[in-house]
Image (cartoon, coloured by chain):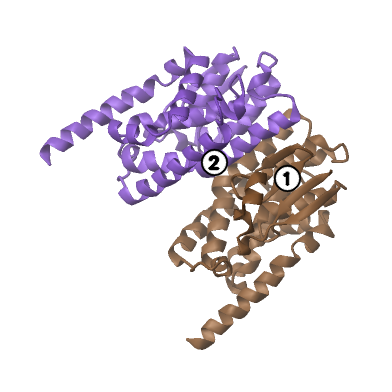
Chain colours: A brown, B purple
Amino acid sequence: MGLKVYADRTSQPSRTIIIFCKMNQIDFEEVKIDLSKGQHRTPEFEKINPMKKVPAIVDGRFKLFESHAILRYLACSFPSVSDHWYPNDLTSRAKIDSILDWHHANLRQGAGTYVFHGAMAPAFGLPLNAQVAEQGKKLMLSSLSKIELFWLRGDSRFLLGNSQPSIADLSLVCELMELEVVDSEERERILEPHQKIRDWMENVKRATHPHFLEVHGILYELKARLESRRNKVSTNL
Amino acid sequence: MGLKVYADRMSQPSRAIIIFCKMNRIDFEEVRIDISKGQHRTPEFEKINPMKQVPAIVDGKFKLFESHAILRYLACFFPSVSDHWYPNDLTSRAKIDSILDWHHANLRRGAMTYVFNSALAPALGFPLNAQAAEEGKKLLSSSISKIKSFWLKGNSRFLLGNAQPSIADLSLVCELMQLEVVDSEERQRILEPHQEIRDWMENVKRATNPHFLEVHGILYKVKARLESRRNRVSPKL
């Protein structure tokens, strides 16, 4: 009874876990929990994660939720995981922890709010909310500037000037990939001023190829669906 | 040149670091950064923490911010720290990581939003905001219910049924202590239905006394000042 990963690939932290496992040859069974169908609210899934969120893992009898806790656990539990993902060296590890912690109330909150209330909500039967989306966008933009200023200084390929990606790179870039589902021109306007961010995203994609592209496939499908819906609405106006 | 902890004792995560160091006999110098006087925005402090937030530490040439990253680092680095704070056992550790991660967008966001917008804002030069306070209170209440249902099941003395406190207990209880500065009746209404939460807070206080009481001293002073201000305002109505 191996590792089970309960995930919805439209969820940024779910994608992080799946890509991480594939990159590190960790055997696992992916169990799809379709958020748009409310599968996270079933009594069966509540037994897996009482918070009713994805991702969650079950490893034997051990259950765990919160993607950063899962990434740390997997990095430390599986010997096949290379050190650069979550180094043994205490100060290197602490710097990565710092970014992972900062992420929650900054990039994740900003980007998550902006994308959901500005584009994704209809996929879950909820209305868009331009005001809330705008607040999210402000926080997201200031978070992008901070990442560039502090963690991608100089010629950094990855966060903290590392030459290989860590779980922080993977988590934050998967978050930014969610921008694929907003209006393309809007997305370009957001990322255009941030060359370092765009280069860093490319570095992470290349370093985790082919899994990164494969796992993000569903996002491009969702993007197409939402774009076609947006076009239908504009034509009706 | 030993460990320096840059802190404002009005900040919940600052208190967690200070109490943790004192409990574990970690030698440190506390450098006060007074948020109400804007000392976190000076160029000198920006060199310590470019995010301009407390707490932050400097250990030799190593700088670190984000209280959970700091707690993990201190627990792993200093041999005097007992195992129960952040166990070596991977699954026990992962469960604690899970709570620490969940905290950011749940208890912390709820409690901070509520306390700031209903009580503390004027001390920092901002107006109160009843609507924001109400949203914060909703998230705070639902977070408290979740802690009770999932992590304090049965007769748990500490989170996860542990017999001794972890860094998760300390971080979350320091957050809840911030409620001391809101109107006393309001605070009672929030905590009254939750005997397990009140017992747990007492357990953490007792396990970390006298440091817990000493470090929270400033909170009681601020509480008294705010209460006297509220009493001055009410008679006029």
Circle 2 — which element? helix
Q: Distance between the residues labelled 2 and 1?
A: 20 Å
Q: Where is residue A226 in the image (x, y as percent from the top left)?
A: 61, 74
**In the image shown, does A126 or A47 lie closer to the viewer?**
A47
Residue drawn at x 79%, y 39% is A60
- Identify the chain of the residue marked 2, using the numbered disc in the image: B
Q: In this view, does A72 lie to the left or right of B138?
A: right
Q: In this view, does A64 lie above or below B174?
A: below
Q: Is residue B48 visible?
A: yes
Q: How many labels does the image show?
A: 2
Q: In which quarter of the image is residue A161?
A: top right
At a point 80% along the width and 45% down the height, the residue shown is: A3
Front-lying residue, A141 or B141: B141
Image side of residue A67 versus residue B31, left or right? right
Depth check: B160 or B124 in front?
B160
The disc numbered 1 marks a residue on which chain?
A: A
What residue is pinned by disc 1? A57
Q: What residue type is labelled 1?
A: Ile
Please name the amino acid that badge 2 sits on: His
Neighbor class of circle 2 (other Cα within 10 Å; few <14, some 14-19, many 20+) is: some
In the shown orientation, is residue B167 left or right of residue A177?
left
Q: Nearer the viewer, mark 2 or mark 1?
A: 1
Which quadrant holds the N terminus of chain A?
top right
Query: Residue visible at 74% across and 26% down?
Result: B89
Tag 1 secondary structure:
strand
Which x, y percent locates residue A174? 69, 55
Residue underneath mark 2: B104
**Which picture quadrant has residue A15?**
bottom right
Q: On the rendered structure, is A228 left or right of B236? A: right
Measured from the top left, where is residue B179 in percent x and y? 38, 32
- Indicate whether A172 appears above or below B123: below
